[in-house]
Image (cartoon, rainbow, N blue to C red):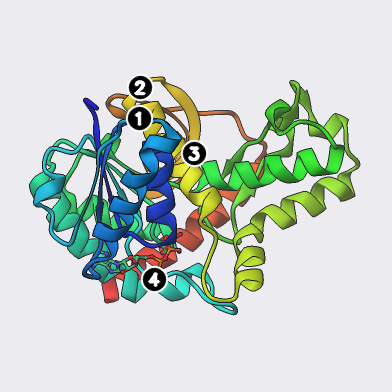
Amino acid sequence: MDKKVTVVGAGNVGATAAQRLAEKELCDVVLIDIIEGVPQGKALDLAEAAPIEKHDARLVGSNGYEASEGSDIVIITAGIPRKPGMSRDDLISTNAGIVKNVTEAVARFSPDAVLIIVSNPLDAMCHVAFETSGFPKNRVMGMAGVLDSARFRAFIAMELNVSVENTHAFVLGGHGDTMVPLPRYSTVAGIPITELLPRDRIDALVERTANGGAEIVSLLKTGSAYYAPASAAVEMAESILKDKKKILPCAAYLEGEYDIHGLFIGVPVKLGARGIEEVIQIRLTDAEQAALNKSADAVRELVDVLKRL
Ligand code: APR
């Protein structure tokens, strides 16, 4: 393949992302993990599935970063996932150290890469990667909104018994309890869900979306969601690799957009070959802006925690 993507963290999210990247034949994949043998074993296993899955993506696993040299994109999933009763924010001190180390290595070997951060707490980990890499803001972003809106879309489709393909959903804000799903921009075949569902049902779906990660954690008990998070990261990577210019909600570094300054938070962006090519600004109601501000305050608190680590 003429494109190369490195996935750091060969755990649940990372290995699933590697599988999807390869099976969609988007790129060659380098899988990196700190545990000896795991990235090598998973990459080899995936390579042995290739004749059946019918793709020619090359997969390599490694504990070092040499093989990642010159990657177009690096997806960072390294870190610990949460357990029942934990919030994403409880992961901050452990994952900040991991994301810092990983970013240093990644930036050395792939100075022109786009970084897609998946490790939680997402928005704060984007700050770590942004500051550590020194990359321009268009090449550092976080995966959260695509996942949160996919969850919202899945719940809308279940509620109305329609194809998920007919659904579209918009979710703004940080990846946490303060995320801001926007029902009036969420549609089924172009029809806003506010025309299709009563207020109390929409509120219930919004609530379930905001708690979507915790719902999975409480079922799995030993880790957090990974199929949908991997799909979301791969959708972002695909838009960049193919220069599709899809508009997707991602954590982006804002400098005044939505009246937010110097903070990573989820907003709609255009994703193309240069990474974030534009932050799309939509007009919010006062209530929506207030909810976004509250979400930004929650992210800012975590960024302050980072400074004290
Ligand atoms: N370098 C490389 N890999 C590392 C490092 C490191 N410094 N530290 C940890 N890892 C690896 C672990 O060895 C493990 O294989 O990261 C992997 C994480 O995988 P899982 O434990 O399966 O976690 P996963 O479910 O994939 O979640 C990873 O993404 O969604 C977020 O909250 C989630 O922060 C978590 C991350």
Residue shown at 44% from the left, 60% from the top = 12
- Nearest to N terminus: mark 2 or mark 3: 2
Mark 4, residue position: 80
Secondary structure state at the residue bearing disc 4: loop
Can the viewer see residue 277 in this picture? no
Tell us which disc is closer to us: 1 or 3.
Answer: 1
Q: Which mark is residue 26?
A: 1
Q: CA distance from mark 3 to mark 4?
A: 25 Å
- Location of residue 285 with respect to 246 vertically, above or below: below
Front residue of this view, candidates 140 and 38: 38
At label 3, the amino acid type is Val
Residue 100 horizontal/vertical position (percent): 21, 63
Residue 250, given in percent of the width and then of the height, sits at 45, 41
Q: Which residue is mark 2?
A: 242
Indicate whether 176 appears above or below 158.
below
Amino acid at the residue labelled 1? Leu
Say which quarter of the image contains residue 199.
top right
Residue tagged 3: 267
Q: What amino acid is found at the position of numbered circle 4 in the picture?
A: Ile
Does residue 45 appear anywhere in the picture?
Answer: yes
The reply, left or right, for residue 13 in relation to residue 293 is left
Report the quarter where the N terminus lies. top left
